[in-house]
Image: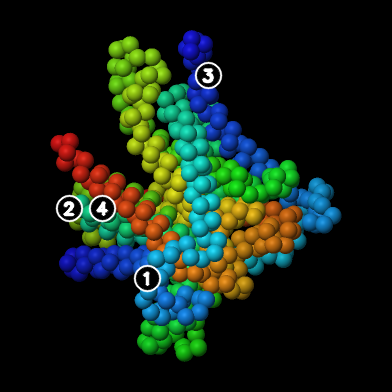
Amino acid sequence: MSFVRRHALTAFAVLAFGYLMLPIAVVIAFSFNDPAGRFNYTWEGFTLRHWQEPFGSPGLQEAIVASIQIAVLASIVATILGTLIALALVRYGFRGRGLTNLLIFMPMTTPEIVLGASLLALFLNLGVATGFWTIFIAHVMFCISFVVVTVKARLVGFDRHLEEAAMDLGANPFTTFGRVTLPLIAPGIAAGALLAFALSVDDFVITLFNAGPTITFPLYVWGAARVGVPPQVNVIGTLIFLTAAGLMLASVVMQTRRPKGTT
Amino acid sequence: MGWLHRHKGIVPYLLLLPGLAWLALFFLVPTYYLANTSLQTGSIDVGYAFTWAWENYSDAISTYHEQFVRSLKYAGIATVAAFLVSYPLAYFIAFRGGRWKGLLLLLIIAPFFVTYLIRTLAWQTILSDSGFVVNALQTIGLLGDGDRLLATSTAVVAGITYNFLPFMALPLYVSLEQIDPRLIEAAEDLYASKAKAFLRVTLPLSLPGVFAGTLLTFIPAAGDFINAELLGTPRQSMIGNVIQSKFLVLTDYGQAAALSFTLMAAILVLIAIYTRVLGTERMGV
């Protein structure tokens, strides 16, 4: 009986993982497809053409460049602002902590479409033309909360004796922060920055509302979806997937190895 | 520096200031402008003016209540479906994952590594009329010859389920992972059947994960318009589709803002009810 149950659960898990992987497999497979018309829906034949010129579709390269520029700028700013908030929350007791937590929590639980619509309402009423910089403002806004949560998780396990030791040895607060605190919390900050970058590159809904004439990669895909998505989009999608999966895999492998090294 | 040392109490506020100012300026202030816009009338040609136009709300709701109900219904079904797939999966990883846990979790969030729009377009390919899923279902007779999957409500709900599944699976995993297996063993030692041990020990202990997972799935699902746009037809359109086209195509800002606000309010009310119901249930356990 327990034998059957154990295997039923395993079988279910295998099926569920297959379901999760299926669209990813389709994205990768159709980057090698040689579509007959404008639509890349049915398998017509194998080709490496799209991989040889991944930017072969007009406007695609500009869209990717815009996406990367926004993501780099937004993740840097959001990481700095978010890390400072996380430091204040973990290190200091102060009045207004509950309100601070609420303000950080709320953007994460508001539907994206409401976030995007509110910002557009702001820009419309103030007469601000939407474009590159309004996308940047929006991305920093929704990334801050995620950086705070990520960096906070790292700070909570921090041994403050190390800082006290540095101070006892004559380091001033700024040297202590730069030479002791920062290197120790750097992995948390890096994780927060990567998350912010990933969220920014992938964001579609909030960007759509505040983009004006600027076209990011998701907006390019949205526009192309009506007239037929070029297979180059699958190539870029595959490259993004491989990069993100590779980074995550590396961090998982490092985490699994660490206990062995330390014990 | 000496000044900072004398006024130590001010340090946390200096750290908070830039980030919270950004959130206040670009999250709180915009919410005010959304409320303000929802009471404005006008058009792109003559301009917009604040006129306490409460009729924006009544007009919007009487015209679009169908899309509202549909959004909440689709989001509800997708949340339940995501739960039914995620719970056994999270259970499997937490209790049978062994040293592969990290890798299996990676597989769960792998869909997030593919751009949202691209993975939804992949479902368009999978569910298309000439695709293998439709062919297989027609062969075994579950689908008639002329029947489709794409452009149906099934496709839209399936897309929403897939896209938000990791939001359900991760909190479930976290709460299941924290359960001490000895508690389950103890229940079995005390002659509880496997089923009873699960219902009386494992399930109640995982309720915080169920709670977080359902909220994290339902909220974005209710506001979604991408799945309805790419996998459905106008007959499957959700409230997100209406808000999007009113803001960005029709420039009917007053009603668009009124609909956004109503969506927020509807979600908050549902969450409040849900919190009460699940809260009392947990006390009963």
- Hey, what amino acid is under mark 2? Asp
Q: Label 1's element?
A: loop
Query: Which residue position is annotated with label 4?
Result: B101
Q: Which residue sits furthest right?
A: B46
For residue A176, the mark is none
Disc 4/disc 3 C-alpha distance (Å): 44 Å
User: Chain ID for label 1?
Assistant: A
In front of the other: B282 or A21 = A21
Disc 3/disc 1 C-alpha distance (Å): 60 Å
Q: Position of residue B148 (x, y in %)?
A: 50, 82
- Residue in the image at 72% along x and 48% along y: A124
Q: Position of residue B132 (x, y in %)?
A: 39, 80
* Marks 4 and 1 on same chain: no
Graded by Cα atoms within 10 Å as few (under 14), some (14 to 19) or many (20 or more), the crowding at tag 2 reads few
Query: Which residue position is annotated with label 2?
Result: B189
Q: Nearer the viewer, mark 4 or mark 2?
A: 4
- Residue in the image at 47% along x and 30% along y: A84
Q: Label 2's element?
A: helix
For residue B10, the mark is 3
Horizontal side of A25 relative to B241 (left or right) equals: left
Q: Nearer the viewer, mark 1 or mark 2?
A: 1
- Of callouts 3 and 2, the N-terminal one: 3
In front of the other: B202 or B27 = B27
- Hey, what amino acid is under mark 4? Lys
Query: Which residue position is annotated with label 1?
Result: A48
- Of callouts 4 and 2, the N-terminal one: 4
Work out which quarter of the rendered image holds the C terminus of chain A and state it.
top left
